[in-house]
Image (cartoon, rainbow, N blue to C red):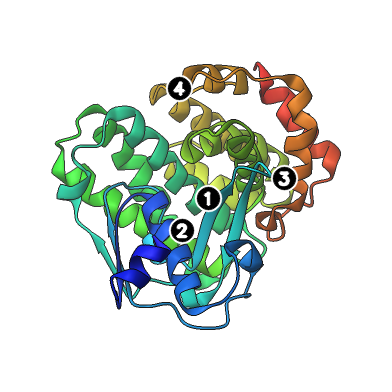
């Protein structure tokens, strides 16, 4: 993309699609006005010069990339998903038109929708959460939990598609403010090693991280459970919070999503090897999304979750 931009004398970028086109356009934009390789910008706030104008037109309801200043670039040589984040990456215009999402097949609807729900939940329980991000995250959780099953069942349901556009956009704005957490660290590692869809990796890892985080954020988890439809009558705060995890697990099942790493990898023709867990642990430990997580994870914590999820 970069040579084409230069050879054609372009002065702006338009990305059309889900996360990958938006993130690709952001990476091209970085290198248009900044020297070196894309690897030089891995991490936080490393971009010196502004990007050319970028208009992001979204065709999925999941990633929120059109509303955020992050880009994820796969490094296939190092088996890494590089996180690059800088305010200069924010598109100048975001287009979320539900008509553009109606052709998503059910499994893409499910995976991208769970990606957005993960964004909202992680933004809400983040150590960097604030009143602005909390309002957006709670609205996103409500919109997605009420409308994702409908959009999954009937892709032409325009009310559900419209509300999913709002929900994923609110979730993107929420995590733009308060960032993410260890679900993404695990999902980035799993996706990088086996080249698996990011949203489905998030869906698989989310219940494990929620349960691990619960002691530190039981009040917020109980609020999430209430939005998801749980009845807290007669339950302690901790018991009510546990219902949030149970309902997310049920949500995944109802959307036909994989319940283990082996199942998910098998769906995409991959042959998972338990020996790869060490590489995934090392990737997760280095992932910058883990910093705002409400509970610090050790390498062994990551390993335990990968092992539990291996053939759950």
- Disc 1 target residue: 121
Quadrant (top left/top right/bottom left/bottom right) for the C terminus: top right
Q: Is residue 25 left or right of residue 182?
A: left
The quarter of the displayed image where residue 214 is located: top right
Say whether marks 2 and 1 touch (CB < 8 Å).
Answer: yes
* Marks 3/4: CA–CA distance: 25 Å
* Farthest front residue in view: 7
Residue at image point 45% right, 25% down: 257
Q: Residue at x 52, y 28 (%)?
A: 249
- For marks 1 and 4, the one nearer the N-term is 1
Q: Is residue 16 above or below residue 147?
A: below
Q: Which mark is residue 253?
A: 4
In the rendered structure, the answer to whether residue 30 lies left or right of residue 239 reads left
* Label 2 to label 4: alpha-carbon separation: 23 Å
Q: Does residue 236 appear in the picture of this structure?
A: no
Image coordinates of residue 146 in percent, x first then y, are 32, 41
Secondary element under disc 2, as helix, strand or loop, is helix
- C-beta proximity under 8 Å, tags 3 and 4: no
Q: Which residue is located at x 72 percent, y 45 percent?
A: 284
Q: Which residue is mark 3?
A: 284
User: Residue 226: x, y in percent?
Assistant: 47, 44
Residue at image mark 2: 137
Q: Marks 3 and 2, how far apart in space?
A: 24 Å
- SS at badge 1: helix
Q: Nearer the viewer, residue 265 or 48?
A: 48
Q: Nearer the viewer, residue 6 or 74?
A: 6
> Residue 222 shows which numbered tag?
none
Q: Mark 4: few, some, or many residues within 10 Å (few <14, many ≥20)? A: few
Q: Please determine whether, in this image, residue 302 is positioned above or below residue 293.
A: above
């Amino acid at each position: 993309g970069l040579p084409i931009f230069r050879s054609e004398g372009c002065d702006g970028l338009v990305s059309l699609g889900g996360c990958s086109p938006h993130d690709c356009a952001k990476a091209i934009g970085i290198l248009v006005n900044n020297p070196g390789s894309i690897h030089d910008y891995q991490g936080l706030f490393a971009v010196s010069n502004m990007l050319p104008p970028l208009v992001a037109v979204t065709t999925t309801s999941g990633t929120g990339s059109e509303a955020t200043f992050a880009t994820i670039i796969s490094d296939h040589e190092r088996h890494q998903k590089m996180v690059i984040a800088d305010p200069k990456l924010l598109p100048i215009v975001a287009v979320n038109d539900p008509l553009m999402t109606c052709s998503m097949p059910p499994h893409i609807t499910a995976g991208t929708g769970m990606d957005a729900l993960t964004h909202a939940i992680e933004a809400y329980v983040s150590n960097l959460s604030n009143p602005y991000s909390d309002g957006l995250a709670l609205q996103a959780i409500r919109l997605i939990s009420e409308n994702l099953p409908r959009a999954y069942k009937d892709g032409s349901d325009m009310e559900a598609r419209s509300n999913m556009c709002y929900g994923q956009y609110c979730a993107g704005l929420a995590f733009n403010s308060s960032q993410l957490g260890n679900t993404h660290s695990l999902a980035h590692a799993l996706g990088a090693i086996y080249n698996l869809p990011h949203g489905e990796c998030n869906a698989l890892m989310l219940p494990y991280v929620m349960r691990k985080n619960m002691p530190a954020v039981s009040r917020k988890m109980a609020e999430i459970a209430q939005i998801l439809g749980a009845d807290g009558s007669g339950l302690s705060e901790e018991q009510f919070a546990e219902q949030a995890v149970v309902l997310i697990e049920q949500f995944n099942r109802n959307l036909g999503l994989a319940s283990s790493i082996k199942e998910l990898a098998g769906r995409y023709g991959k042959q998972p090897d338990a020996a790869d867990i060490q590489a995934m642990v090392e990737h997760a430990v280095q992932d910058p999304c883990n910093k705002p997580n409400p509970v610090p994870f050790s390498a062994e914590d990551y390993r335990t979750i990968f092992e539990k999820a291996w053939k759950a």
